[in-house]
Image (cartoon, grey):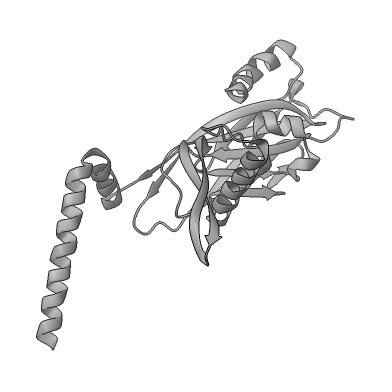
Amino acid sequence: MKRRLLLLMAPLLMAQSGAKPVLVPDVSQRNIEIVYSFTGAELLLFGAILYPGGRLPKGEAPTDIVVVVKGPTQSILVREKEKVAGIWVNAARLRYRSAPSFYAVASSRPIERIVDERTRAIYELGLGSLQLSPASSATSDVERRFQAGLVDLKRRAGLYVEAPGAVEITDGVLYRGRVSIPARVPVGRFTAETFLIRDGRVLAAAVRDIDIRKSGFERFVARAADRSSVLYGLVAVALSVALGWIAGQVARRRA
């Protein structure tokens, strides 16, 4: 919530000062449809930096661009396994109220070289600065351990990504970067947040929305499972039994 308020207030503060640059961002695809043959997509994030007076300031430090693409938040239960008598079993667990289902950050330089730890925490820039909001109380050591485990699992699934140096700035005015969307991406409303940073300070910020949804037969199946879960389950069981019976009959005839 704090970060959202900062993003909403940024244009107003810049307009009052009259001396801050403004971001004009865009994305290559506002709508991504997932069909049976979907193997992922590459999202191009680009835009321009508008400086006061229409000119690039002279003698000032160069600016950096950081783009954060986030998927809808979801509640996630993380379980920790331990080995008991040679068998891996579930042990401690921790639930998070709101963890992003997808998170990718692309930047013109490594995040650690652009902003300090406090600024990273305020704007959630980088995997190490995510605010995941655990639903139950736990010690700081336990929270850090579970958060590191969750981030590692999401990273290996391609759902949490850091891409330092993936944003290219041309002549200090135009920028572009690419973020890969994996085949296993969840559906919903995504946001692409762009930050303009100089000397460790966020000068401007802008947000663009992206919709990722299922299409065709996949959309029909997903909607049926969501709206009529009981009927969907019964139909799935009936189809499984029918297909098993047919497979058995074919095997008997060939024998």
The percent position of residue 18, horizontal first and vertical second, equals 73, 14
Q: Residue furthest front?
A: 85
For the point 62% across and 25% down, the residue is 3
Q: Quadrant of the N terminus?
A: top right
The quadrant in which residue 238 appears is bottom left
**Between 123 and 17, the one nearer to me in the picture:** 123
The percent position of residue 61, horizontal first and vertical second, equals 85, 33
**Between 242 and 71, the one nearer to me in the picture:** 242
In the visual, does 116 lie left or right of 93? right
The percent position of residue 89, horizontal first and vertical second, equals 48, 57
For the point 63% across and 34% down, the residue is 194
Question: Can residue 209 be seen in this snapshot?
Answer: yes
Q: Quadrant of the C terminus?
A: bottom left
Question: Can residue 41 be seen in this snapshot?
Answer: no
**Image height check: is 3 above or below 65?**
above
For the point 51% across and 50% down, the residue is 91
The percent position of residue 123, horizontal first and vertical second, equals 66, 30
The quadrant in which residue 105 appears is top right
